Structure formats: structure tokens, C-alpha cells
């Protein structure tokens, strides 16, 4: 039979016909199916077939599908349940399920399809009972995936359409989840219905560091495991998609408590993951947004979820937040972000907070790291929301100078109390594009009365290896004057260990993504010993950042780490709270020592 003619038969059949993707989503339907359920084709394409069943019937129906046996293909006993039309009204249906093995020429491991014969068995809002209909699909079950063998011929138009989908045009090839295109289609269809719609956006915190440390293969394994856990946290008719990289999205429809789902996901992903022979516990940040009377379209709902995601990251990561309208006015989401930031610089709204760095060996605070903050309408805006804007606009130079001046001046009394005390300031590689940057730093230090030996500059690895910059020359100039230099996020790059000896460097800071792998303190993580030993052999000191638990602190102390930093000791705070910050840090040191 000609493929076009077969396609025409399917389209114009008086019986309602649908085709289902392997996860149960609808990939084809004809006019009779639109008429039966009251949905348009656009509304149903990409939606889960469970949408056509009332909530009370879905679990039993999925049980019927799971009970089909490809080894002895036969129709299951008719399933009687409640269907659901577009207007929400119930539609009594009777469904007979039958397996259809894969088409001739397909791989022997290809999953069989499921033919669903659907008959409306009652009146539909005054309409007569529906005609018998057949719903063909490829709903995979654990049994069918394992036992599909005997090929049979199916209409060529159906086979061609199914092959196209299996090629991955709407699927992420790594996780087999729907991709961004299919997610957007399903979101658009869901918003056209009267039911509640919720969207969760999430990604893994510091995934680049995990990717560099674990290697590509293990990082992919991690993403697959995350995908599996997400699937297990939602109902069959909800959608989990991978949008790219480490970013996932969840579409909830007819959900009465989306916050509970967000918490379930957070709890599930908090459990350690075993990948590449190691236990990993990546942080996950999530943003939740829900359809309201003012929701315009899917793009608007995604924008809201993205704003909540960014706010979650700003709150310290590894958390989730529900969208609030004020999140759209954060600098990272304002169209006039550069203008607002420029005004902040001019009005003196850039302030500095300080986080202590403790030395386990001497049991005291030896350094404070300075963090830029933007004070906007009484709210503190964290760096990761405005520093990218500052770098793109060139304002990073002015902000960097202001932070340097404030840091040296505001904690000068503490620095004057002990020559071994120091302040660390983060600098961008872009600041070194000014060939006089090193000279300007020394001038600031001299003007504030601070010894150059009490200043530490922190740069990420990429800044050191920017071949087109003047970084190394200026860093050598600064070190000759006594300024110390630290490599931030150590271990996340590809060439750190090999090239450390070539760099003008005094300190390496182990990235927090590695620290998060320590949960009980009993883990076997030999790369810590390797990194710390390599640094010490090169005459460098080692600081571990992101310490949040006594177990992590003890683990790093036992391996000879020179200094520790993180929320366990204190969060960044203004200079006016320095005394309380140090008290908190010293109390945490005592607790860790007691635990040892």
C-alpha cells in the first residue's frame, strides 16, 4: 500500500486514532480523535496520553499497560474507566489494550507498540455515545523493553512517523527525556487548558567542576541518574525534560501541591549519587512558577521560573524558591541592568561583606575574604547577579577599585593588630587589561596604610591562562612588592596541577564542588590527598572553601589543609559585624576540635 494512501486512511478514518511516543506522549491524532475528546490537534500533540483519562483511572490504566506480556502477545481484558474531555467533563470509556511488536526491519530490541481500542460508553454532554475507536501507541513497559522480538508489518506511514520520533528529533539523546522543543510544545498545550500548570526549572550547582573532576563519561552518567530520579518524583502524565547541559525542566499539570513536588525532588536529589565509582552529592537549585490569571504564555511562565531559579542560586544555591514578582526586578533580570549598576557605582551603593578564613593549626581567623554587594532599595544583591553585567559593560574596573579601597580601609584596625592577618579580594582577568592595574593596586594599599603583604588577590584559573592579557607580568610585579596571589576554584580546570609551578602563585583554594562530596567524613576520595600534596610540594598553601559541616572540616584538617572557609564558620557580613563574625568562627573551630 502506498504510504501516502495509508496516511490518508488514518487521517480520514471514522474511528478516533492516536499514536503514542515511547513515554506515552501523543505524536499523531486524527479528526475523529479531536471530536471524541474535544481537544484540538495542537493541544494534544506532545501531551501525555494520560491527559485523556480522569485522575481516578490513570493508575489502573498504567497497571494494565505494565501487565502486557510481549512473550505471549494477546489483548488484555477490557479496561473500563473514566475518560476526560477538554472541558473537564467525564467520558465513560472502555479500552482494550494489545501489544503490536516492532515493525519489520526494526532492531530486535525495539519496543513493541500498544494498540488501545477506545469506546465511549456513555453520553457526552448531550451527544450520543461515541463510535468505537482505536488508539495505537508505543507505551513502553519494563517487560516489553526486555522481550520484544517478533516483528510484524504495520502501515508504512505509521512506521515512518514512529522511526522519525525514535531518531531523537524531540528527545535528548543522552537521557531520552523530551528536549526543549517538546517541552515547549507540551507547556503551550497545557496552558490552553483550564487546569493548574506549574513549571520547575533546575540545574546542578557547580556542574563544570564536577564535569572536570569526574570526566565526561561519569558526568554524563550523573545526568542520566538525575533524569531517572526526576522521573520517579512526578506522575506519569507530568513532563520531565532536559533543556541542555545540566538544566532540566518539569511540567506539572493538574497538580494540587507543586511545592510538595519541589520538596520531593530536592530530597531525592540530595541523596548521594554513585557515578564513576564515587559517591557524589551535587547541589541543585530550582525555581518554581505557576500559571495565574495574568500568565500570558509559556515564555512568560519560563521567565518567571528562571527568575526564581536565579534567586535560589543567590540565596546560597542547593535550594528552591517559588516565584515572586519582585524577582523580575533583580539586576540579572532587568533590561536596564547596566544603567542601574552604573548609577549604583556613582551613588556609592556598592558595599563589601567579609567572610572569615580560619587556620586549624593555630585555631584562629587569619584572613577575611571581601565580597562585593549591591545595596538596592534596602535589599542586598549578591555578586553572581550583577558581576556578569559589570564585566560585560566594563564597570568591573570601577567596582573592583571600590571594593579594594573599602576592603583595605574597613578592616584596617584588624589587620594592624597582627602582621600575619590578611584580606583577600577577588579580581577579574578583565581588570588586568589595564596595564597599570598592578601599579594602581599598590597605590590603593599605600593610601590606606595597609602592608602589601596583608593583601591577597584571588583569580580563577582561566585568568592565569589568558594568553592575550598582561596578567602574569603584573602578578609578578605585585608579588615582588609583597602581595600574595591565590588561584580560586582550584581543581576545576584541565591543567592546574601541571602548570602550577609556572605561575606567580602562593595559595590554591579547593573548589566547593569537591568539598560537597564529603558527607560523613568516611569517604575514600584520594584526589584530596593528591591536590594538597602537590600544592605543598610546590611551596603553596591550601584553603578549602565551601565548608558547611564539621565532618567536612575534620576531613580536610586530617589531610593537612592549611585553611578552611565556609558557612560552618560564618556567612559574609558587613565590617560592622566583624567581632560577631570572628566569635562565630572561633566557636565553630572549637566544635570541630572537640569532634576530633
Image: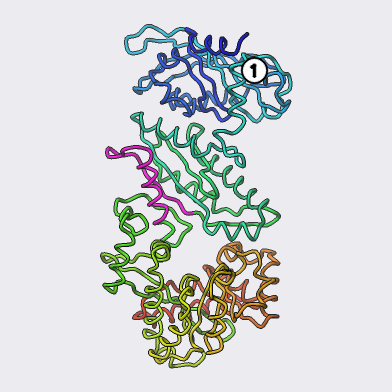
Rendering coords of residue 201 (x, y %): 45, 47
Quadrant assignment, res 65: top right
Q: How many marks?
A: 1
At 73% across and 25% down in the image, what residue appears?
108
Q: Which residue is mark 1?
A: 100
In the displayed structure, 159 sits above or below 175; it is above
Q: Using a 10 Å C-alpha cutoff, classify the residue at mark 1 as few (fewer than 14 neighbours), some (14 to 19) or many (20 or more).
A: many
In the image: residue 348, left or right of residue 262: left
310 falls in the magenta region? yes
484 falls in the magenta region? no
Rendering coords of residue 538 (x, y %): 68, 80
In the image: residue 291, left or right of residue 179: left
Quadrant assignment, res 142: top right
At 46% across and 85% down in the image, what residue appears?
439
Q: Which residues are magenta?
A: 285-311
Q: Nearer the viewer, residue 263 or 540?
A: 540
Q: Quadrant of the C terminus?
A: bottom right
- The secondary structure type at the circle numbered 1 is strand
In the displayed structure, 258 sits above or below 501; it is above
At 52% across and 38% down in the image, what residue appears?
179
At 57% across and 83% down in the image, what residue appears?
476
Quadrant assignment, res 42: top left
Rendering coords of residue 167 (x, y %): 62, 31
Rendering coords of residue 374 (x, y %): 34, 68
Amino acid at each position: 500500500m502506498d504510504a501516502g494512501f495509508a496516511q490518508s486512511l488514518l487521517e480520514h478514518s471514522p474511528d478516533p486514532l492516536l499514536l503514542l511516543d515511547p513515554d506515552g506522549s501523543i505524536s499523531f491524532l486524527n479528526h475523529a480523535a479531536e471530536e471524541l475528546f474535544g481537544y484540538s490537534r495542537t493541544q494534544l500533540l506532545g501531551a501525555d496520553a494520560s491527559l485523556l483519562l480522569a485522575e481516578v483511572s490513570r493508575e489502573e490504566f498504567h497497571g494494565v499497560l505494565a501487565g502486557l506480556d510481549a512473550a505471549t502477545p494477546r489483548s488484555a481484558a477490557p479496561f473500563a474507566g473514566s475518560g476526560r474531555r477538554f472541558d473537564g467533563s467525564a467520558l465513560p470509556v472502555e479500552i482494550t489494550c494489545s501489544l503490536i511488536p516492532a515493525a519489520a526491519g526494526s532492531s530486535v530490541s525495539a519496543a513493541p507498540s500498544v494498540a488501545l481500542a477506545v469506546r465511549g460508553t456513555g453520553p457526552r454532554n448531550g451527544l450520543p455515545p461515541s463510535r468505537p475507536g482505536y488508539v495505537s501507541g508505543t507505551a513502553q513497559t519494563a517487560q516489553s523493553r526486555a522481550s520484544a522480538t517478533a516483528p510484524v508489518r504495520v502501515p508504512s506511514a505509521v512506521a515512518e512517523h514512529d522511526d522519525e520520533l525514535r531518531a531523537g528529533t524531540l528527545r535528548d539523546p543522552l537521557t531520552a527525556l523530551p528536549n526543549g522543543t517538546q517541552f515547549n510544545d507540551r507547556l503551550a498545550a497545557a496552558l490552553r487548558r483550564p487546569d493548574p500548570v506549574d513549571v520547575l526549572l533546575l540545574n546542578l550547582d557547580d556542574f563544570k567542576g564536577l564535569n572536570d573532576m569526574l570526566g565526561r563519561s561519569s558526568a554524563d552518567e550523573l545526568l542520566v541518574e538525575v533524569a531517572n530520579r526526576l522521573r520517579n518524583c512526578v506522575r506519569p502524565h507530568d513532563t520531565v525534560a532536559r533543556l541542555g547541559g545540566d538544566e532540566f525542566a518539569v511540567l506539572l499539570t493538574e497538580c494540587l501541591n507543586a511545592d510538595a513536588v519541589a520538596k520531593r525532588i530536592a530530597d531525592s536529589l540530595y541523596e548521594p549519587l554513585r557515578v564513576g565509582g564515587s559517591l557524589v552529592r551535587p547541589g541543585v537549585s530550582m525555581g518554581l512558577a505557576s500559571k495565574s490569571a495574568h500568565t500570558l504564555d509559556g515564555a512568560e511562565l519560563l521567565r518567571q521560573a528562571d527568575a526564581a531559579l536565579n534567586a535560589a542560586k543567590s540565596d546560597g544555591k542547593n535550594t528552591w524558591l517559588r516565584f515572586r514578582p519582585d524577582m523580575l526586578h533583580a539586576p540579572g533580570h532587568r533590561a536596564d541592568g547596566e544603567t542601574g549598576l552604573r548609577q549604583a557605582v556613582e551613588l556609592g551603593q556598592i558595599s563589601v561583606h567579609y567572610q572569615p578564613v580560619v587556620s586549624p593549626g593555630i585555631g584562629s581567623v587569619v584572613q577575611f575574604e571581601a565580597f562585593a554587594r549591591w545595596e538596592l532599595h534596602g535589599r542586598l544583591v549578591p555578586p553572581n547577579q550583577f558581576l556578569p553585567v559589570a564585566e560585560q559593560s566594563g564597570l568591573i574596573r570601577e567596582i573592583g577599585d571600590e571594593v579594594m579601597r573599602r576592603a583595605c580601609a574597613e578592616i584596617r584596625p584588624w589587620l594592624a593588630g597582627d602582621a600575619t592577618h590578611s584580606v583577600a579580594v577577588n579580581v577579574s582577568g578583565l581588570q588586568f587589561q589595564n596595564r597599570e592595574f598592578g601599579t594602581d593596586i599598590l597605590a590603593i594599599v599605600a593610601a590606606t596604610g595597609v602592608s602589601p603583604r596583608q593583601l591577597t588577590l584571588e583569580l580563577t584559573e582561566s585568568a592565569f591562562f589568558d594568553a592575550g592579557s598582561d596578567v602574569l607580568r603584573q602578578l609578578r610585579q605585585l608579588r615582588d612588592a609583597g602581595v600574595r596571589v591565590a588561584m580560586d576554584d582550584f581543581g576545576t580546570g584541565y591543567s592546574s596541577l601541571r602548570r602550577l609551578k609556572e605561575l606567580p602563585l602562593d595559595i590554591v583554594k579547593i573548589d566547593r564542588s569537591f568539598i560537597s562530596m564529603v558527607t560523613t567524613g568516611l569517604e575514600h576520595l584520594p584526589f584530596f590527598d593528591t591536590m594538597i600534596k602537590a600544592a605543598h610540594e610546590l611551596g603553596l598553601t591550601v584553603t578549602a572553601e565551601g565548608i558547611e559541616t564539621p565532618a567536612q572540616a575534620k576531613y580536610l584538617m586530617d589531610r593537612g589543609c592549611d585553611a578552611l572557609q565556609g558557612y560552618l564558620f560564618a556567612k559574609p557580613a558587613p565590617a560592622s559585624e566583624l567581632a560577631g563574625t570572628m566569635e562565630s568562627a572561633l566557636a565553630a573551630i572549637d566544635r570541630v576540635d572537640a569532634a576530633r
